[in-house]
Image (cartoon, coloured by chain):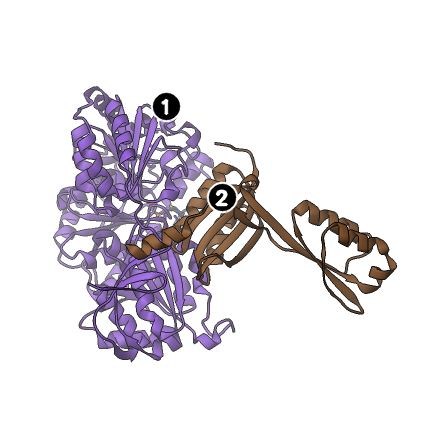
Chain colours: A purple, B brown
Amino acid sequence: MKETETLESKQASKGSTERISGSEAVVKCLIAEGVDILYGYPGGAIMPVYDALYKYQDQIHHVLTRHEQGAAHAAQGFARISGRVGVAMATSGPGATNLITGIADAQIDSTPLVCITGQVFSHLLGSDAFQETDIVGISTPVTKWSHQITKASEIPEVMAKAFYIAKSGRPGPVLIDITKDAQVSELDFKYEKCTGVRSYNPVPKLNNDTVQAAADIINAAKKPMIVWGQGVILGKAEEELKAVIEKAGIPAAWTIMGASAIPTSHPLNVGMVGMHGNYAPNVLTNQCDVLIAIGMRFDDRVTGKLETYAKQAKVIHFEIDPAEIDKNVKTDVAVLGDSKESLAALLPLLNENTHEGWLEEFKKLYAIEFEKVIKDDIHPTKEGLTMGEVLKEINKQSEGNAAIVSDVGQHQMIACRYSKFNKTKSNITSGGLGTMGFALPAAMGAKMAAPEREVVAIIGDGGFQMNIQELGTIFQTQIPVKIVVLNNEFLGMVRQWQQLFFDKRYASTEMTNPDFITIAKGYHLKTKKVTKREELAEAVKEMIASDSAYFLEVCVEKEDNVFPMIPAGASVSDIRLS
Amino acid sequence: MNEEIKTFTISIYTENNIGLLNRISAIFQRRHINIESLTTSQSEIEGVNRFVIVVNITEHQAKKIIGQIEKQVEAIKAYYHTDEETIFTESCMFKIKSNLLFEEPQIQNIIKESNTRIVTVNKEFFVLEKSGRRHEIETLRKELNTFGIMQFVRSGRIAVTKEEMKITEMLMAFNNQ
Ligand SMILES: Cc1ncc(C[n+]2csc(CCOP(=O)(O)OP(=O)(O)O)c2C)c(N)n1
């Protein structure tokens, strides 16, 4: 294929041009990028594009959410389960600003999104016109790239660049703002996919010397430990990671964002690190001799106090983003590159090993955690229902094959701790931003991207009410997503902190809730409310068996706490079991 | 790594796009790093801009900042250098009442000795321009201040580096891919 080069970006050229409007061009660009579903909400400044969507509705399905935040999170859920670019659309002004939380969430969790916003006519820019906001300016700190189109002729090239940037390298959200005049005027349309941007190097070239240096350290290690993150999933490196841990016999733990890349049942999967992670990998982070970080970024919720984090260990960091190297934790060897390629290069250099004695230490600490925490979470003897037993029941009924979309709070930590994951891309949650209200719309997006999968949203009574309006989208679009609200009548996670660190002063965390079942019924969903242990199994079974959307409310113990816990600012090895 | 706070000159080659200044300044703002000066202009390469930013930070911070800047899609390459590694200058202008030029013979001496250029003279005022290091400009300002300055303005630092910055090669490599 012959390539033409524009000034800054490369595009594969093919075909001739046709004369169409800018708004039609936008839709044709989406179709050319393989977009068949997008989420959004119309309004004045984006109406021409909606008109074009109407014309192409047999090729591209626009899902009308009930709030632009819902559209952004739905696009995130879509992207997270499928690895494809999620697309959200909104009008100018309030429509655009309503997208911002979802965009910020996608930025910190490296989710590929293309967000399209309408903008006032270009001659009105800067005049405080009706529904004008400087959305490019507002979104700058939370986007990977953003651009305003003021001429129809720019649309194909900018859209191609947007998709390329969103999905290449370390993915992220891109915002394209299109003035109304650019939508309504005509251009000679020809679409060429973008294959490169000269100022942007998405994947650093792998340096084999660094891989060798990493292998030498790993081969000499007595007590190596892996902590992997979402980079493994984004890089589609699950098989490579599995091969590495199995060959070298290295216990491997995961961050919230990395969950499910290796099945929960894998004998070398030693659980979750971080604030509410498992006891063994947290404690042993400070005893291992080599810490191998793969596609993770040493978030403070993972490291606890940095001054006492893995100081005894040599640190190896496999990472695609050079800015992450030494950002929080000083590394001995940094292997820059795509995780799939890097791990594939590492594998043949590793010696076979089993590290049996060292693995034993993980098992010993697991036994302690089981006795002190897990047993009471999943086999409770007290009267009230626990969140853990609900998760255990969902695992059982879904056979560990469900994708779990969790919101933010106690139920999120419980969902991450106790979900059984057989398949990758099964844990969809707001990790970096911790956005309450994420789960309901994200679950819709996930279910639509992967209709063959069981998608179960796990949400607190607080977070449910942050985007509760999306029940309307689920109803109208008939999205067969399963919704579980774990109702403790508190903003549980905040209440837990108030109990532990603010002397039980429960300031503004108690919730007087509406009757959720009546609300769900108003949207014509199948519903069930569980208040007793005896009802749980049957209700979960019915929910999983349902072919349509299902709303399950489980009233759980009001004042349960999530343990283990690394108090803020404490060392990972000072993790508390009670 | 050296934790001592030093003056660093950060040089950034970028695409010439609206909005990039915002992205770059936000990187400093988020980290509470005060920008001492910022200059942007065309670089030696057609269509490529160059930022010269002066900050007082540790080398450790400088490294991280460079990483964050290069991460921006439209930043081609960024570097940091100490004062010893660059040739740098600032320039300044003074507007002064014209009568002083004749009434205060001292002023003419100052102009001559400091290598200051007279840009224009008219009935009301004359304008001086000088390029140099900060301390030279400061000395000049203090000397002239005793006679009264109507306006004073100083530019940000501009700098070239002693080492080569291989931007052209990088861009060529992209074109040949
Ligand atoms: C948008 C937003 N606002 C506030 C918070 C702070 N916050 C974190 S967890 C939490 C409580 C969540 O309560 P709920 O949804 O009922 O879940 P639970 O912790 O009880 O499981 C709050 C308020 C947040 N993460 N996101």
**Residue B57 visible to the viewer:** yes
Residue A382 in the image: x percent, y percent?
26, 34
Quick check: A487 above or below A470? above
Residue A398 in the image: x percent, y percent?
14, 46
State which mark lies toward you, 1 or 2. 2
Q: Look at 33% across and 51% down and name the residue there.
A: A201
Q: Look at 21% across and 47% down and name the residue there.
A: A425
**Residue A533 visible to the viewer:** no
Report the number of numbered marks.
Answer: 2
Q: Look at 80% across and 68% down and name the residue there.
A: B124
Which of A182 and A408 lies nearest the eye of the viewer? A182
For disc 1, the chain is A
Distance from disc 1 to disc 2, alpha carbons, whole Å, reads 32 Å
Q: Amino acid at mark 2?
A: Tyr
- The image quarter in which residue A182 lies: bottom left
Residue A208 in the image: x percent, y percent?
26, 36
Quick check: A416 above or below A221? below
Q: Quadrant of the C terminus of chain B?
A: bottom left
Residue B52 in the image: x percent, y percent?
53, 51
Whether labels 1 and 2 belong to a single chain: the reply is no
Q: Amino acid at mark 1?
A: Gln
Q: Which residue is mark 2?
A: B80
- The image quarter in which residue A34 lies: bottom left
Q: Is mark 1 within 8 Å of ligand 1?
A: no
Q: Which mark is residue A312?
A: 1
- The image quarter in which residue A431 lies: top left
Q: Look at 24% across and 45% down and name the residue there.
A: A233
